[in-house]
Each structure stands twice: as structure tokens, then as C-alpha cells.
Image (spheres, helix red, strand yellow):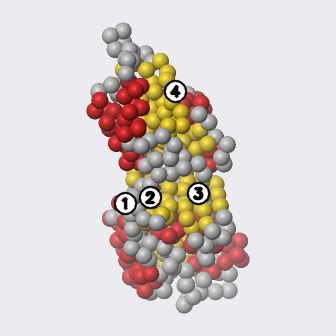
């Protein structure tokens, strides 16, 4: 049997602790399946004295992960610190410079510097594995990087943030407000004390940018993603979606068009009878549309210590099974120097249309004014419904819910902006895309 693969783990949070525990408990079976033992020989974390319930005897402790990457007796650096800059980036760069393989769950780092890090790894014949960076325990990276070789992918989309999916699920099933669901998510540990990164779509955007590069063979471009979170979703939207036969999900969508690549993250109405609409709670789902295989949907746990550690361990096992000089899997599916420049496409019309909810002054001529603005922007309506709302005696209001046929984002936004300028809209209009997978 070959010499043991020596691992250094930077970061002993939930995922890092789970990884150490799993490797310790399953040493024998891992050695058999990988053809060599996997040993954790070094670790680094901020608090040496914290009780993590781990047996770290015989493991070298480093207060500084960069020092560990530069000097520890290891073959692989596992980076579980997080963040696009700081210690995480410095440790990964130091490891690659030294000639160590790298496994990371750091989506922010990859979205920011993935092409550069992939090039550095390839220059030295090293593996840069990051299955855990996207969709937790779902093996979507391996599928896109290896299993779908030869396929031309036209679209990739999915539910990629468990916090948002949990909140939207609770809002629908229990009739709770967004604020109440967020507080519960924080209490259960699904949401951070500052949840902005999750609920405003940034986390999903980082994951989508990585998958876009793999799907379309282009450079990573996180800054070119249309971004909208879920903080403005109300019970009124949830109920209206249900009445129309939809459920609201935060989706990340990337698709190739004649004009380039379109990337977007936003709340989306999906038909209630589709599989992705049934994905509830903290579960993630990723759909891939390709020419040879057809449509592939992968569903599974998108977060959590064990699920993410499982993905990390899979990456480590791939390295253990490889041999020096045989590292042929490019980090982003093709050599970094062969990646095409990212070309952003204008957001086009799409089959699903739009859901538009307006609260308007209840007075003569408002409906006609709305119809005129829609016609001015060449928007055709599939349906329009009026609901009475509680306004004061002096200023009664009603809710208008419209579903459009296929149209463009620009047309919808222009129409709504014009209505706001007309002065009969009360509060903030709601616009949600309708996606028909």
C-alpha cells in the first residue's frame, strides 16, 4: 500500500470538526477504498483551547494557517476558513506555491480568484478540488467537471441557499412573516447573526458564478450577475403565488444565449407540480440541461457539518486515489488558459413571464392607466385580478395582480417605473419572474 496521504486542516468550525471526526472514525475503510491511508497530521484554528470533542493527539497545531501551509508535514491543505481574502486566500496560495494539493469549501474565494488559483494549480500539476463550495453534499461539481464531459450545457439553475429556502418554506406552510421566519432560522443556526449575505442572494451568486464557468467554459464573473434577494417577499406574494399554482423559490439561473451568458439570482415563481417546487427546508437542488444527457436534477442537503464534510472528504479521496504525475482534471473543467472571456448577455424575454403586484389608489381611471403603461411597453397580459385592501376612508386602495406573457426585464421595469411616476401606486411594487422548468 502506498504511503499515507497527509492532510492539514485549516479551520475547525462545524465542517472542519466533522471532517476530522469522520476521517478518524473511518480510517480503515478509507484506506481500503483509496488504496492508501488518509491521516490528519496538522490543524489550524483560532482557539486552541476550545473543546471540540476531537482527539487531536499526535496532530501538530498551528495558530497560523499560512505557516501551516508553508511548513507542516502535509500533502494536502484543506481550507475551511472562508472569505475571499485574508488568511484563507494566503494559505491556499502558499500551499499551491509549495506544491500541495488543495481542497476548499470556500465559494467566496473561488468566485473572486478561482481562475488564478486554477492556473496556479495546473502549472504545478496539482489538484484544486472544491465540491463542498457549491450545494453542500450534492456532487454537482464532479458531475459538471467530469461526468458531463462531451455534453453541451444550455442552462443550469437551482436552489442553492438553504437559509432562503427554509424561510420561504416556513412562510408558505405556516403563514409566518419573513421577519419571524428569519428569527427562527437564526435561532436554529441556519442563518447568521448578520444574514445579509444569504437573504440578499450573494451566497447563491457566488455558487452560480462557479457553476457558470464549469457549464460554459468561461472565466468566472461574479460581478455580472443580476441580483435580488428575498427580504421583500410578503405573505401577500406567497398567497397569490399559491392561488396561481406556483411556489416562490430563490433561484440562481445561468444560461447561454446568442448574445452571451445570462446570470441571475432572484425570487422566482415555479409551477407547483414541478420537482424543484417540492424542495423544502434547507435542502438544495441543482438542475442541468444538456444536449446528450438531457435534463438532470440533483437534490440533497446543501449545508451542515456532515453533509459538507462528506463533499470535502470526497475531494480528499480523489487526491488519495491519484498518483504523482497523473493530475489531469482541470479545476474548472478545462485548462484555465483555455477558458473563454465572459460575455454578458442582455436579460432577454423568457417563456414564463412575470408576476406583478401593485397596491394602487382605488379611483376611476387607474386600471385604464395601468393597461396603457403595459401597452406602451408592448407587454401582453395573461391575467389581471383585483383585490380589495384596507385603506383609510380618505384614501381607499386595492391590490392589482398581473401575470404577463413573455417579455423583457427592461420592459417590465420601465412599465412599473412609469406607473410609479403617474402617482397612483401606494408602497413598493412587487415584480417576480415566473420560471417554467
Identify the secondary structure beneath mark 4. strand
Measure how far apart labels 3 and 2 are at the Cα level: 15 Å
Please give the label number shown on residue 286.
Answer: 3
At label 2, counting other C-alpha atoms closer than 10 Å, the crowd grade (few under 14, some 14-19, many 20 or more) is: many
Q: Earlier in the sequence, mark 1 or mark 3?
A: 1
Task: Name the residue carrying label 2.
Answer: 263
Q: Earlier in the sequence, mark 4 or mark 3?
A: 3
Residue 105 appears anywhere in the view: no
Measure how far apart labels 1 and 4 are at the Cα level: 35 Å
**Residue drawn where x is 54% and y is 37% of the image:** 382
**Residue drawn where x is 58% and y is 57% of the image:** 286
Task: Name the residue carrying label 1.
Answer: 224
Mark 1 or 4: in front is 4
Mark 3 or 2: in front is 2
Q: Earlier in the sequence, mark 3 or mark 2?
A: 2
Q: Earlier in the sequence, mark 2 or mark 4?
A: 2
Q: Earlier in the sequence, mark 1 or mark 4?
A: 1
Quadrant housing residue 293: bottom right
Instruction: Indicate left or right for 283 with 130 as reference.
Output: right
Residues tagged 1 and 3 counted as in contact (Cβ below 8 A): no
Identify the secondary structure beneath mark 1. helix
Q: x%, y% of residue 323?
A: 59, 87
Q: Nearer the viewer, residue 339 or 184?
A: 339
Q: x%, y% of residue 296?
A: 65, 61
Amino acid at each position: 500500500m502506498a504511503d499515507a496521504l497527509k492532510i492539514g486542516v485549516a479551520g475547525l468550525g462545524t465542517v472542519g470538526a466533522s471532517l476530522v471526526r469522520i476521517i478518524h472514525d473511518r480510517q480503515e475503510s478509507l484506506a481500503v477504498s483509496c488504496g492508501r491511508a488518509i491521516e490528519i497530521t496538522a490543524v489550524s484554528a483560532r482557539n486552541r483551547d476550545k473543546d471540540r470533542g476531537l482527539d487531536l493527539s499526535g496532530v501538530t497545531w498551528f495558530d497560523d494557517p499560512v505557516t501551516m501551509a508553508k511548513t507542516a508535514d502535509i500533502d494536502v491543505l484543506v481550507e475551511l476558513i472562508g472569505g475571499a481574502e485574508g488568511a484563507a486566500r494566503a494559505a491556499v496560495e502558499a500551499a499551491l506555491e509549495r506544491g500541495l494539493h488543495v481542497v476548499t469549501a470556500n465559494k467566496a474565494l473561488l468566485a473572486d480568484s478561482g481562475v488564478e488559483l486554477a492556473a496556479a494549480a495546473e502549472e504545478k500539476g496539482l489538484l484544486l478540488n472544491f465540491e463542498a463550495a457549491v450545494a453542500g453534499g450534492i456532487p454537482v461539481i464532479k458531475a459538471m467537471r467530469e461526468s458531463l464531459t462531451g455534453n453541451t450545457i444550455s442552462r443550469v439553475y437551482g436552489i442553492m441557499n438553504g437559509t432562503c429556502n427554509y424561510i420561504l418554506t416556513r412562510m408558505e406552510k405556516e403563514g409566518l412573516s419573513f421577519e419571524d421566519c428569519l428569527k427562527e432560522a437564526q435561532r436554529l443556526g441556519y442563518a447568521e447573526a448578520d444574514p445579509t449575505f444569504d437573504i440578499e442572494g450573494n451566497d447563491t451568486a457566488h455558487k452560480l458564478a462557479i457553476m457558470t464557468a464549469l457549464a460554459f467554459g468561461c472565466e468566472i464573473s461574479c460581478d455580472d450577475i443580476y441580483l435580488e434577494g428575498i427580504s421583500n417577499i410578503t405573505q401577500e406574494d406567497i398567497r397569490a403565488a399559491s392561488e396561481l399554482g406556483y411556489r416562490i423559490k430563490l433561484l440562481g439561473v445561468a444560461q447561454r444565449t446568442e448574445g452571451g451568458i445570462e446570470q441571475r439570482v432572484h425570487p422566482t415563481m415555479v409551477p407547483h407540480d414541478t420537482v424543484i417546487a417540492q424542495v423544502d427546508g434547507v435542502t438544495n437542488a441543482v438542475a442541468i440541461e444538456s444536449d446528450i444527457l438531457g435534463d438532470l436534477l440533483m437534490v440533497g442537503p446543501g449545508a451542515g457539518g456532515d453533509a459538507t464534510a462528506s463533499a470535502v472528504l470526497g475531494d480528499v479521496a480523489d487526491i488519495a486515489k491519484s498518483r504523482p504525475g497523473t493530475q489531469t482534471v482541470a479545476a474548472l473543467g478545462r485548462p484555465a488558459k483555455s477558458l473563454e472571456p465572459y460575455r454578458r448577455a442582455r436579460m432577454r424575454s423568457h417563456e414564463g413571464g412575470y408576476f406583478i403586484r401593485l397596491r394602487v389608489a382605488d379611483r376611476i381611471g387607474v386600471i385604464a392607466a395601468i393597461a396603457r403603461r403595459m401597452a406602451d411597453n408592448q407587454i401582453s397580459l395573461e391575467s389581471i385580478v383585483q383585490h380589495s385592501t384596507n385603506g383609510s376612508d380618505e384614501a381607499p386602495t386595492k391590490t392589482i395582480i398581473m401575470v404577463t406573457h413573455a417579455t423583457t426585464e427592461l420592459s417590465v421595469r420601465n412599465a412599473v417605473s412609469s406607473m410609479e411616476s403617474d402617482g397612483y401606486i401606494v408602497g413598493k411594487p412587487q415584480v417576480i419572474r415566473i420560471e417554467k422548468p
